Image: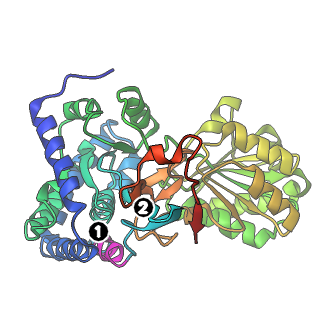
């Protein structure tokens, strides 16, 4: 499993890890100043960044034409001047967030003069392997600087020039701040370097894959480093028998068509049998008007005679389309909807549309996903929309961090004990001193 690691990759990682140790002594004001310097440098280099992106885009379009690249990746790759402005604004938004480092999470007096604190601290060195999205570079890097972590970024080939220009600009900005080492943000480009990086379990603290199912599975199979991320975004919306039809149509429309390539776009709509005959024709008409192709269960197809609808085979309900395609299934009710999500979902984000408060309560309690929503689009599953400023990705893990991972997800904690010469043996034996164990709010 562990690949031989070239000295070049190891030296980059060791330098980044050293930078992580050095930034831990930097104040939050210094980290925020560095982020402002990054934002200003990205503004100055906007022309060069967009020029690099134009080259990536031309090559990606040719690969799509030749069938060598999925069109969904081309959509995720797109970077306009407005989007770059939004990325820069995101860097500044992270600078305005509260400092996640050094927070006292718990405080306990063990005995007089013996104080124990649980204190938030950085994870260390992150390795982020991602496809297509240029915004991942600025989001992840700004969160790393703010949380006093170092990051090594490996973009997919389809975004390599854009990512290279972004990383170069950020490193130039960091050179102006002696408290923030330039090595804190590092990029690698070669595919062969990925497995080498994944072999550095003695240096890298966390791997974050952002991309396709195949990418995540490859990373999982080639590393012993802890992993944070999700392999698929198979999101569901259940339209309950007590749903408001107009609301349901609007939510489904947004969740499918706002950004169909996003991992939080809806892929399957489950419809209660009690309302299927009246709701499905309205859904089919709304989706047809929005250019969405429908696929469905036998019962859904039978409920919509004359509608062009491809049958979904049982093993296909796991599918993440990432496109203007929507699967529709008629279910017997809330229980069957929850069972379907448990069997075919990816534990990303699932929603119920209903005016029945008890049905909503059961759904929110029993659906075990990172995000469970009532009467809201699955597209709200996003770090920026949650108020995190940005995110490094969405985790479907049940450990450490779950859902959109922002600053808090890039921290761990340590126990800090302050005493005055106390020794453990004084609290042992027949004449042992007693611990107070007084917890403070």
Q: Residue drawn 50% across and 52% down?
A: 401
- Residue 122's label in the rendered image is none
Span of residues in magenta: 85-96
Q: Is residue 356 visible?
A: no
Q: Quadrant of residue 339?
A: top right
Q: Quadrant of residue 223?
A: top left
Position of 221 compared to 260: left or right?
left
Residue, far right: 274
Q: Which element type, helix, strand or loop, lies under badge 1?
A: loop
Q: Is residue 206 visible?
A: yes
**Height in image: 424 above or below 121?**
above
Position of 159 compared to 434: left or right?
left
Residue 250's x, y, as percent? 67, 70
Q: CA distance from mark 2 to mark 1?
A: 41 Å
Q: Which element type, helix, strand or loop, lies under badge 2?
A: strand
- Residue 119's label in the rendered image is 2
In this figure, which residue is indicated by the disc labeled 1?
80
Position of 175 compared to 292: left or right?
left
Answer whether labels 2 and 1 touch (C-beta < 8 Å).
no
Residue 85's x, y, as percent? 28, 75
Q: Residue drawn 35% across and 79% down?
A: 96
Q: Residue drawn 55% across and 46% down?
A: 396
Callout in the foreground (2, 1): 2
Question: Which badge, 2 or 1, comes first in the chain's sequence?
Answer: 1
Instruction: Check the picture and name the quadrant holding the C terminus.
Output: bottom right
Q: Residue drawn 46% across and 43% down?
A: 425
Choose between 395 and 437: the one closer to the eye. Answer: 437
Instruction: Specify few, some or many for label 1: CA neighbours under 10 Å numbering under 14, 14-19, or 20 or more.
Output: few
Scheme by which the image is coloured = rainbow
């Amino acid at each position: 499993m562990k690949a031989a690691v070239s000295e070049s990759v190891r030296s980059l990682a060791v330098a980044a890890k050293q930078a992580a140790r050095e930034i831990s002594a930097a104040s939050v004001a210094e980290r925020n100043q560095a982020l402002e310097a990054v934002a200003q440098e990205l503004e100055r280099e906007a022309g060069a960044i967009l020029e690099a992106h134009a080259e990536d885009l031309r090559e990606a379009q040719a690969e799509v034409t030749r069938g060598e690249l999925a069109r969904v990746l081309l959509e995720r790759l797109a970077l306009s001047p407005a989007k770059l402005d939004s990325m820069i604004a995101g860097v500044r938004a992270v600078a305005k967030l509260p400092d996640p480092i050094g927070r006292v999470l718990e405080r306990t007096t063990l005995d007089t003069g013996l104080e124990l604190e649980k204190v938030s601290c950085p994870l260390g060195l992150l390795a982020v392997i991602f496809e297509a999205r240029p915004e991942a570079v600025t989001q992840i890097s700004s969160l790393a600087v703010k949380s006093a972590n170092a990051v090594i970024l490996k973009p997919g080939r389809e975004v390599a020039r854009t990512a290279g220009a972004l990383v170069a600009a950020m490193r130039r900005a960091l050179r102006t701040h002696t408290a923030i080492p330039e090595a804190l943000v590092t990029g690698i480009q070669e595919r062969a370097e990925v497995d080498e990086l994944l072999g550095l379990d003695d240096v890298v603290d966390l791997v974050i894959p952002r991309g396709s199912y195949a990418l995540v599975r490859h990373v999982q199979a080639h590393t012993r480093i802890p992993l944070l991320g999700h392999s698929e975004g198979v999101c569901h919306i259940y339209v309950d028998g007590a749903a408001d039809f107009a609301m349901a149509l609007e939510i489904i429309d947004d969740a499918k068509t706002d950004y169909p390539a996003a991992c939080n776009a809806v892929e399957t709509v489950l419809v209660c049998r009690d309302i299927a005959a009246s709701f499905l024709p309205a859904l089919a008409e709304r989706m047809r008007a929005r250019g969405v192709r429908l696929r469905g269960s036998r019962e859904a197809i039978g409920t919509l005679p004359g509608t062009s609808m491809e049958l979904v085979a049982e093993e296909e309900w796991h599918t993440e389309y990432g496109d203007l395609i929507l699967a529709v299934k008629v279910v017997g009710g809330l229980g069957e909807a929850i069972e379907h999500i448990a069997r075919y979902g990816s534990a990303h984000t699932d929603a119920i549309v209903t005016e029945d408060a008890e049905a909503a309560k059961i759904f929110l309690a029993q659906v075990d996903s990172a995000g469970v929503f009532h009467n809201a689009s699955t597209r709200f599953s996003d770090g920026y929309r949650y108020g995190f400023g940005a995110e490094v990705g969405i985790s479907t893990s049940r450990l450490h961090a779950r859902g959109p991972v922002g600053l808090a997800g890039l921290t761990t904690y340590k126990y800090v004990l302050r005493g005055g010469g106390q020794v453990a043996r004084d609290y042992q034996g027949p004449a042992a001193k007693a611990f107070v164990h007084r917890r403070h709010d």
